[in-house]
Amino acid sequence: MRCSRYVSTLILAATVSIASPHDGKADVPALEAAVREKTASIEGKLIAWRRDIHQHPELGDQETRTAGIVADHLRSLRLEVRTGVARTGVVAVLKGAKPGPTVALRADMDALPVKEPKGLPFASEAKSKHLGKEVDVMHACGHDAHTAMLMAVAEVLTSLKDQLPGTVQFIFQPAEEGSSVYPSSSGESSGAALMVKEGVFAETKPDAVFGLHVMLGKSGEIAYRAGATLASSDGLEIKVSGKQGHGGMPWQTIDPITASAQIVNGLQTIVSRRVDLTASPAVVTIGTINGGTRANIVPETVEMTGTIRTYDEAIRGQIHRDIANVAGKIAESAGATAKVSISPGYDTTVNDEDLTERMLPVLERAADGRVRRSLPVGASEDFSVFAQQAPGLFLFLGVTPEGQDPAKAAPNHNPNFFVDEAALVVGARTMASLAVNYLAAQSGK
């Protein structure tokens, strides 16, 4: 249920007392009320932007059309705009009329190599190249919604420029899902890392950075968590080498397949028997196993790949060492060898605990009380890079339609993932409210 504008204004006035219009500081209740009114007034534009971007998705480092739409909109707001940051990223700066701190707001723009089923009038039929192969493309993770919401936030906050104390930096990031042009081994697959490397904060250093991701959950509900929120993500490759020979005479061979099977089982004991799960959860998953050419040939090698997810750096390092030890010793016991390669990926996304606590009342008001504490999420995010540059807060916006059980709905990265567009105005309102409240509170110190 949506509150009327009059009731919402009363709620804000009753619950916020950061500043008053008579002491030279920003009038926070008035700003929040204005944010609510202005986001509601452009909800139609917000949805139209999202549908257009959804219908024309682009993979990581190919977001030229999306970046063009974003940049044109930001220029129409007369903001300072930089394009081509980390190849296709867009950054804009809004300077308020009053002195104050700087806050950064981030959205990611890239889509996934997923084929979208027919049904939506704005369904994607796009195709593109992913690491040299032609693939179908779909916004199966909701980045189209993120981009559209931040475009709306930029318009709302620009309209309040004369009342804003401080600076807002809008970051439209490419390649959160990794580059579709450069392999992960090249070190150029994370859009956030490359933006930082290219100096996205060199001229405008934020005092806080905020991000938001659409997820399964009640439509319009905001989920938050202080501390470790999304997992680190490391790539795992194991190559088991033996001695090739006839499948009917395995004693003349060194079988890398049986050794690999034992290694997979052994890896499961790392989490179940060696990691202190009362301190932090962890996951080791093998996702692919490839070896052999015929049923009657013991192959020379078997290759497997997987992922490692952790929320604690000490446990992350321990698991890396344990994997090398377990794989190597098991292979040795079979007369084989195991070469283990671990590719560090995204770090754990850690929400600053003090910032989270201070912003919680803002979330409650922006989402009309529909706020819950989240469990740790097993996915990973390169928002973690930005949160290492300044105190960060990364949130989740529920987008499962009313009447549908989120536990049974198609999740992110599934071709049937569906975004209830009624939730988008809540997301935009939340991001804008976080910005005005942080700026007002910090400028008053």
Image (spheres, helix red, strand yellow):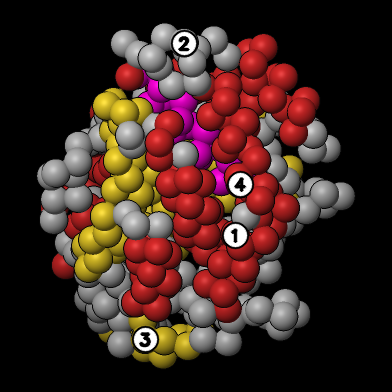
The type of residue carrying mark 1 is: Leu
Q: Which residue is mark 2?
A: 22
Rendering coords of residue 405 (x, y %): 80, 48
Residue 279 visible? The answer is no
Alpha-carbon span between mark 2 and mark 1: 35 Å
Dominant secondary structure of the residues highlighted in magenta in the image = helix
Whether 275 is drawn above or below 71: the answer is: above
Q: Residues within 10 Å of mark 4 (few under 14, many from 20)?
A: many
Which sits earlier in the primary sequence, circle 3 or circle 1? 1
Instruction: Give the Cα separation between the discs numbered 3 and 1.
Output: 29 Å
Q: Look at the numbered disc 2 and give the secondary structure of its residue.
A: loop
- Find disc 4 in the rendering and name its residue: 39
Residue type of the residue flagged with mark 4: Thr
Residue 21 appears in the picture as rendered: yes
What kind of element bears circle 4?
Answer: helix
Q: Which callout, 1 or 4, points at the residue further toward the start of the chain?
A: 4
